[in-house]
Amino acid sequence: MKKFIFLINFIIFFHFANAQTKAISFEVNGLKVILKSTQKETVSMSMFFRGGVMNYDAGRAGIENLALAAAATCGTKNYSVVDYQELADEYGIEISGSSTTDYGTISMDCISKYLDQGWKLFSDAVVNPAFDKTEFKTTKERMITAIYHSQSDPETRVEQLSMENMFKDSPYSINPLGNNKTVGSFTAEMVSNYYHNELLNKNKMFLVVAGNITKEALEKKILASFAALKQKPYTPPVYDRKMLTGEHLVVEQRDIATNYMSCIMNAPTMSSADYYAFVLTINALSGSMNYELRTKQGLSYAPGATIKTQQIPYTSMFVSTTQPKKAFQAMITVYNSIKEGKYSQRYLDALKKDHRDGYYRHQESASSIVGDLGEAEVLGSYTIIDDMVANFNKVTLQDMKDSFAKYMKGAIWVYLGDEQVGRAAFQ
């Protein structure tokens, strides 16, 4: 029995110790690397490219997303498209590329025992993408299909309208997917030139890896594969983080059965000391909205609130409903309740527990670890992730109330659906 208890305690201790392993950062020949060592059976990595939509003008919207997707799928200098795809299939290697508002990535996931094979394909996709014209055409058609889908999906369209109106007349309002006109005009040569001349720059890039690999082994791979990476001058973009003030309404007519409403408000950056209290307050707002609008009044199947975490973040309080007037009134009631701090210490403790549980579940995936560390690095520092649970645990009820009052000073109401009904709802 004692041996059994000792074994259980050892397993618990080992699991806890492993979970507490912090990420480290180092440079290899000028390339920043972030490594989170794990004992997982999978390894995940992403090469991050800073800048996102700030790297190009509206006339080239979508070029970075297409460039990174094509780099990951359209063959390389050392592997034809067929060989590349066959090797990926044989070893269960997944390689993909895409770009968002703040950054782009080329990512690779594989089983740990096939890391060498995965690394060869990944590193060649980063350094030597071939942009095979036939495969590029297929990739571009897939991107255009995704654009059509995003335009027809109401929830995605509301998010696009939010970005367009929150950041009007700013490059930050550019849709990273682009549009049918811009993406349709790109050739393989144009995209290749953009990738090699504007993206492939060590000063704009950093690598994030999570898996069962040592720092020394990773350094060796990087030195062998990325020696040819160029290091060119790079000036990080400056973000105009103005506080939203006043209120106004944006309405887009669409003949759909259910109307979509979203209230866009301010939010702190991830690197702000206010971030943790504000996140918990928005979690409280979301939970209260779900109870009031879905459970109690039956006005919506998926109401809630969230923070769009990015260089210039915002809060969204959203609902889809067939009764916009009642839904709007219910949203205001819930909002005022949270603003007045009508929640208890017991509720705050439950919010913290839910957040901790969600964080640890999320960290069970190597790809999630890489995504979290990389995004945090772009938005301030990768160390934010390792310190996150401790900082959430420090939040008090007063912190929540203060953060809500500090940032909730303006709003943009976005409405998609029957325009006449929508305008009447806000009167």
Image: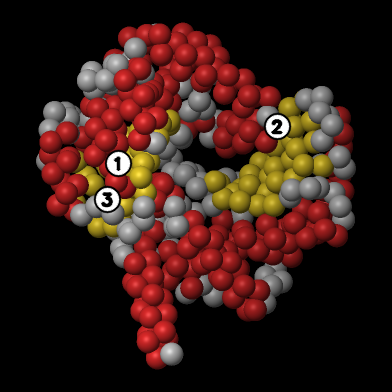
Q: Nearer the viewer, mark 3 or mark 2?
A: 3
- Please name the residue that numbered disc 1 is placed on: 114
User: How far is the residue under mark 1 from the one under mark 2?
Assistant: 41 Å
Is residue 180 positioned above or below 161 on the image?
Answer: above
CA–CA distance in space, label 3 to label 2:
37 Å
138 up-or-down from 26: above or below: above
Q: Is residue 413 above or below residue 420?
A: below
**Residue located 58% across and 19% down the image:** 145
Q: In which quadrant will I find the N terminus?
A: bottom left
Q: How is the image coloured?
A: secondary structure
- Discs 1/3, front: 1
- What percent of the width, then of the height, locates residue 155? 67, 36
Amino acid at circle 1: Tyr
Question: Considering the numbered disc 1 on the image, is that residue within a helix, a strand or a loop?
Answer: helix
Q: Secondary structure at mark 3?
A: strand
Which quadrant of the structure image shows residue 349?
A: bottom right
Q: CA distance from mark 1 to mark 3?
A: 21 Å
Query: Do the residues under discs 3 and 2 have CB atoms within 8 angstroms?
Result: no
Q: Residue beneath label 3, please?
A: 34
Q: Left or right of 176: which side holds 366?
A: left
Residue on which disc 2 sits: 154
Look at the image and tell me whether residue 334 can be seen: no
User: Which mark is first along the chain, 2 or 3?
Assistant: 3
420 or 318, which lies in front?
Answer: 318
Task: Name the image quarter holding the C terminus.
Answer: top right
Q: Three-letter amino acid code at disc 3?
A: Ile
